[in-house]
Image (tube, rainbow, N blue to C red):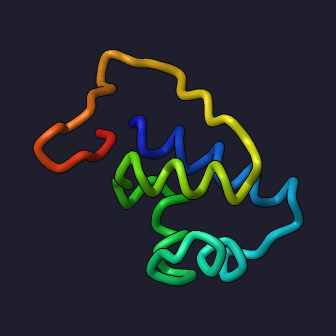
Amino acid sequence: MIAEQIGSQIRHMRKLRGLTQDQLADMVGGGGKQFINKVELGKKHITIAMMEKICAALDCNMQIRMSRNYKIDKSQNILK
């Protein structure tokens, strides 16, 4: 659930900035267009560090709507 919310916000901010998925992937040093696509679709959990890189690339502060399903998996440092 939270992955879809994060992905939707990332997609919205990327489009506002006029960036393609390839361009954003190059900026954050991720796994390419496929990685960004999966993140935006909520099919990929991202690390907090990657989320910070994406926010920096998009020049935004990501506000996550908290839900009961939101938690940080400290063992893997990912948002779930």
Q: Relative to residue 74, is residue 59 drawn left or right?
A: right
- Identify the residue at the far left of this view: 75
- Image position, residue 35 (x, y; %): 46, 74
For this rendering, which residue is in front, 6 or 74?
A: 74
Location of residue 28 (image quadrant): bottom right
The residue lying at 27 percent from left, 28 percent from top is 71
* Left or right side of 47 for 35: right
Q: Is residue 61 left or right of residue 34?
A: right
Q: In which quarter of the image is the N terminus?
A: top left
Up-down relation of residue 75 to residue 66 (above or below)? below
User: In terms of image quadrants, where is residue 20?
Assistant: bottom right
Residue drawn at x 46%, y 67% as measured from the top left: 38
Which one is nearer the viewer's eye here, 67 or 64? 64
Residue 29, position as x, y percentages in the image = 52, 77
Q: Which residue: 45% across, 19% down?
A: 66
Q: Where is residue 13 in the image (x, y as percent from the top left)?
A: 76, 50
Say which of 53 and 12 sits in front.
53
